[in-house]
Structures are given as structure tokens and as C-alpha cells.
Image (spheres, rainbow, N blue to C red):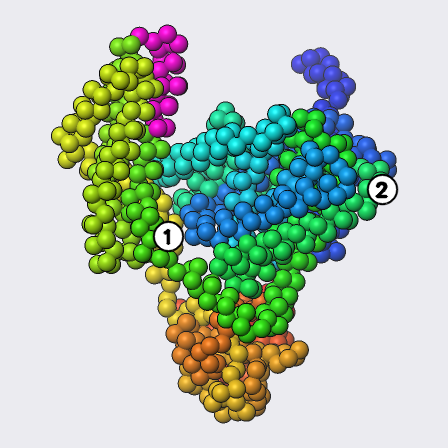
Amino acid sequence: MAGIAIPFLKEAMDMHLPALVEDLCLILMVAAAVSLVCKKLKQPVVLGYLIAGFMVSPNFNFLPTVKDTANISIWAEIGVIFMLFGLGLEFSFQKLAKVGKSASITASLEIIAMLGLGYLTGQFLGWSKMDSLFLGGILSISSTTIIVRAFDELQLKGKSFVTLVFGVLIVEDLIAILLLVLLSSVAATQSLSGMELTYSSLRLGFFLVVWFLLGIYLLPILLQKFRDLLTDETMLIVAIGLCLMMVIVASQAGFSPALGAFVMGSILAETPKRKRIEHLILPVKNLFSAVFFVSVGMLISPKVLVDHFGVILFITSITVIGKFVSSTLGALLSGRSVKHSIQAGMSLAQIGEFSFIIATLGMTLKVTSDFLYPIAVTVSALTTFSTPYMIRASTPFALWVEGRLPKSIRDSLSRYEVAMSTRSRQNVLSLIWGAHGVKVVLNLVLVVALTLFVSRLAVPYLLGPEVGRSALLLACALTLLVSTPFLWAIFFGHASVGPGDASVQTVDQLRKLQFGVSILRFLIGSGTIGFVVSNFTSMLAFSGVILISITMLGAVIFSRLSGPIYRKIEARFVSNLTENERVEIERKARTPQLAPWNATLIEFVLSPNSPLILKTLQDSRIKEQFGITVAMIERGDSRILAPRRDDILLPGDRLYVIGTEEQLLAAREVIERASSSELASIEDNFGLLSLILTNDNPFVHKSIRDCGLREAVDGLIVGIERGGERILSPDSAIQLRPDDLIWIVGDKRLIKGLQV
């Protein structure tokens, strides 16, 4: 045995590690070091990855260089896949629907404006038309990854404007797919093909609907069936497998692999496993995304930076200002408030991963100059650096702008916001679309998808390329038979009227429109059957009429069977789609109503007409009357944290108070006039956090008044959980005990310091 082992060990010692392993070691070690420095300097980690990429590139001679760039590029492409998969998990199609109008208007205006501005900028700089067009494409798409990371680091998720920004990013990603098709077409033909763009748009929409419908219907059933077997390990493998499967499907269908990853993430986001999958996939996503950004940084060229330094600064300024202005205007036009519009505009003022993809497309097609890609990367790095500062400054800047707008403009914007947010029920087309159109279109897509699957994939695979006419007619009949529930929904499905729409006037108007709607549905259904038949036989003139007649007769005869089958399918789909909401409602129902964390921290502006003016907090009896607690008073540029009983209330004071929703609504009538601005959550470092008291904690066995916590955190205790009992706004004489869970409102940094 020893004679065998010694040569083996000697051979193993003589072996060299693959270049990929050495490259990964170099990349990750340098990225780790630089990212730690960035975190120490409170800079974005993504910026550190870009710098690390430059440091391991051939353009930097003081460190070893990456040897196998081809394999690193593959890992970077995997990084894009996992980044968009993670984005899909965080923002589902259902959430997009809630901000669909605002997000679509904002993203469309921004992209159109930046395409035009980028093209004009390129022409102004004397570039070719193709360079200018690709520059417009590069500047039009904001960076999903950079914005998501910035929101994470600034702990802004859950804010109203963040939801709008996420919606804009999703719409931008979808438009970016079409933009890639458009730019490819223009680069190949040197002309703009409207028909090809229209076809690509319809094709993309068709596949998105099919994937979404099938995924929402099938995946929750699959996960529920195997729930007892899904350990963390198997859940991770299943999630990654599903992601890569959709990547392959999207690629085979002619779409971006990243789009497939995003779609699968958005489908899984509708299942109760979303948070678990998101938690499990996070380390994988972080690893591959780091490699992606490092690979981008490797393309930074010092020579290009020196030669085009002025151009880079000019394009960076155009990017930040142009995207801020266009996004803000788009959000205002969509009916959002001035504050949220400015916050969204300042958050979207950068470019990122999709810009790299567009720049790479120009290089691959050899239609752009060599300097365009390094310029795009450098502009992305500069805007990445500025993004956290822009987001951080967005709220103060928005409040500054709001305060200086003339009252007439503020009133006009408020009326416009209300008008845009109010759904009109008098529009006949909107009424028909909501009640019948969505159902008809979704079932039409399912029938078309089933037909294409059988005729283009199943029949050739099972029967070969040469198929007899009788076999095709049999396949056609089977397709129509399987499609019967969906055809029944197209022909006879009942109107979909939501709880908020079921007024007497709405039902009466739908009844009056029934004749025309029935004729339209009959024509659509007949055309759908004709499409099915035409995919299996060319004898549409003869066999189509016969099959349509037979199908109609069968639908009438078997409507009692088809209707219940379809209703079961629809009920299962709706149940899967709304399962997360049901789980959340049940969770909230189990939560005690008076728990401290159900209280909300709200800002009120003290009106000059308020009866509380010139009274001390003790004399105002706010706590006794309404049960709320004043946590902070903001007066001009000064702040009074944890105000005392003898502090006087003055007109214009901003009172940050904590209480339940009912208490706050009652107090609002007294504190501020009805026409004052809407309630807004306090931001920055002032907030509500919890702390568990231990035996050695200096605050235990002392009353709230004497424990010194007010001075330690510039705040006060607003809730205590003790032995299952929950006390909101506790009296200052209550003594703190070990194992108490106390809720403190104050400086979050100081409160976190007590938790360590």
C-alpha cells in the first residue's frame, strides 16, 4: 500500500491548481479587503468591487492579474442571473400591479427622455450616430442592484417611495429587453423596424403571461406536496434548479437569461416560501454578484479615463441631472406627491448592470467605438458613488422644495394627485376590460400556449417531422378537448366584479352591455378555435367550420361540466396568488391589538389655531386625553428629544408622537387643522426599537423616572412586555425588572449601543 500511496502523493504535489481557482482566490481576497475599507469609510460596497476589479486587471501592475478571463466572465453572467432572481423574490408581479400605473408612466417618460438626451449628447460630442444611439440606451436604464443595495444599507425598505422605485426598476428591466431587440435590429439593418419591435413586444408579453399563470398555478402545489422533505439544503437546491430551468426556457425562447431568472423569482415570491428562499439564496447571490462587479471593474482603462476625463464628467452630470428631472416629472405625472416624486427621482439617478449589457452588445456587434464601454463603466462607478448620498439627501431636499412651492401650485398638484388616484367607473372600455377583458385575454393566452406546445413540440417529438393528416386531426381534437374549460371561460365566463366594484350602478351597466360583450366574446372565441385548427391542418375553410360547430355544440352540451372545471382551476389560481396575503392576515389576527409594536410614530404640525398653543406638555394633558406620547419636538433647526413636562408648545412645532392609529386620528383634530399636510413617518436616526433587560443591566430594579434611560438614549420608554402582559405608554413610576422587553423611542444609534 505504501508503494502505491507514495507515487500518488508525489503526483498530487506536482499538480497545479486550475487557473480559475487561483483567479477566484485573487478576486475574492482583493474584493474583501477593498470592501472592508469601503464599509469603514461608509462607501457603497459595489464601488469597492469595481475598484477591486481594476486592481486585479492588467491595467494595474502592483498586484497579480487574473489569468482566465473567459471563466470569470461566465461566473459574472451567473452573477447577473442570481441578482435578478433575488430581485424577483423581493418584488413580485402582484406588487408591481399595485404601482403599475405610476411605475409605467415614470419609467416610460424617463427612458424616452434619456434615450433622446443620450443621443443628443453623443451628437454634441461629435460621435457617430450608432455610438450616440447606444449611449442613449446605456443612460436610460437605472441600476437595480445598486439601488437595492443602497436601500438595504440605508434601511429604507418599506417606505412609500421605495415601492414606486422598485416598480420603476421592474418596468425598466422589461423595457430594457425590448431595447436590446431594438438596438440589435438597428445595428444589423441600420434602420428602425417598427414591425419587429411590435412583434417582439407582443411575444415578450405572451411569454410573461404564460410563465406567470403556469408558475402561480403549479409551483405552490409542488412545494406544498413536498413540504415535509424541504429542508434548508433541499429548498436551496430546488430554488436554484427552478431558477436555472427558467433561464434555459427564456434563452431557448429568444429572451435574456436574466429575464428568466427574474420571472422565476417573481413567481416564487407569490408562495409562502418566499422569505425562506430569499434567506437561503442570499449568500449565493452575494458571492456571484461580487464576481460580476469585479469583472466589470476589470474593464476600467486608465488611458481611456485620462483621454476622456472631461467627457466622463460631462456624461455623469447629464446622467444624474437628466434621470433625476425625468423621473421626478414622470412620477408627478403619474399622480404621486412632490415628496415621493423627488425621492424616487434622486434614487434613480445612476446606471448599472443593464447599461453594461447594452454596451457589451455594441462591442459584440462591432458597431460602437472602443471607448464607449470604459466610459460607461466609469460613469456607472461615479453614479454608484453618488447614489447613497442622493438617496440620503432626497427627503430634506423634497421637504425644502415643498416648503418653497407657492400655495396655488401645491393645491393644483394635490388636486391632480387625487384625480389620478381615483378610478373612474364611467368609462365603458375600462368597465368592460375589468369585468371581462382580463379573463378573456388570460384564457386566450392559455389556449394559444397549449396549441403551440402540442403542435410545435409534442407532436414533432412524439410522431416525428412527417405526421399524417389523421394524426394531426386527432391531435387537434385532443387540444380542443383539453382547452374546453378555457374556451368556456372565453365564450360564457361570468364577469369579474371585485368587492369594491359591486355597486348597483356597475352591475346595471354591465347588464346593459351584455349583448355587445357576448357578440365580442363569441368572435374572439371563434377566432381562437380557428387558430387552434390552423396549427394542425391547412383545410381551415372546410374542417375549421366543422370543428368550430362541433366545439360550440360541445361547449353548450358540456357547459355544466366545463364551467365547474374552469371555476375550480380559477379558484386554485386565485388561492395560490393570494396565499401570502392570507398568511399575513392570519399572523396579524394572532397579534394582540395593544402590543407596543402596533403603535406608530407620526409627525404632526402644531396649528396656530390649536388649543394647545403656549401650554406646557403637562398642562396640555395630551397623554391623558388621547393616550399618545410626545417623543420629540422639532422647532426650526433645533430638536427637543424626549421633551419634559414643562416644555412649552409653540405654533409651527413639529410634534413626533407615538400611539395607535385610533388615538392618533383623534389627536390630529386637536393638534393640527384639517388642511395640514398628510401624516408622515419620522426618518433619519430617530425611531422605535426594543431592548431586553438582563439581570446585570443598570436600568433594572429602578423606576422609569429614575433609571437614567432618558439621558442615555435621548428617548423614552413607550411600551413594556412583561410575563405576557403588554403595557402601552407606561407610567414613569413603574419599576423595570429583569427579562422585561421594553420599547424605546429615541436615537436608534444610542439604543443599538445598549443592545450590544
Relative to 18, is 373 above or below?
below
Residue placed under numbered mark 1 in the picture: 581
Percent across and percent down for residue 18 are 71, 24
Going 64% across and 35% down the picture, which residue do you hit?
A: 358
Q: Is the N terminus in the top left, top right, bottom left or bottom right quadrant?
A: top right
Position of 59 compared to 386: left or right? right
- Would residue 207 be visible to someone looking at this image? yes
Q: Give the camera-side residue of 58 and 334.
A: 334
Instruction: Residue 528: say if magenta.
Output: no
Give the magenta-colored segment's residue range: 448-468
Residue type of the residue flagged with mark 2: Val
Disc 1 element: helix
Percent across and percent down for residue 420 are 44, 59
Residue placed under numbered mark 2 in the picture: 306
Looking at the rendered image, the disc whose residue lies closer to the viewer, 2 or 1, is: 2
Position of 621 compared to 5: left or right? left
Q: Residues within 10 Å of mark 1 (few under 14, many from 20)?
A: some
Going 49% across and 87% down the picture, which residue do you hit?
A: 609
Marked residue nearer the N-terminal end (2 or 1): 2
Instruction: Residue 466: say if magenta.
Output: yes
Going 41% across and 44% down the picture, which residue do you hit?
A: 270
Q: Quadrant of residue 625?
A: bottom left
Residue type of the residue flagged with mark 1: Glu
Relative to 231, is 391 above or below?
below
Asked if the residue at tag 1 contacts the one at tag 2, i.e. Cβ–Cβ closer than 8 Å, the answer is no
Disc 2 element: helix
- Furthest-left residue in this view: 557
Percent across and percent down for residue 562 are 20, 33
Distance, label 2 to label 1, CA atoms, is 54 Å
Label of residue 516 in the image: none
Position of 478 compared to 561: left or right? right
Relative to 384, is 83 above or below?
above
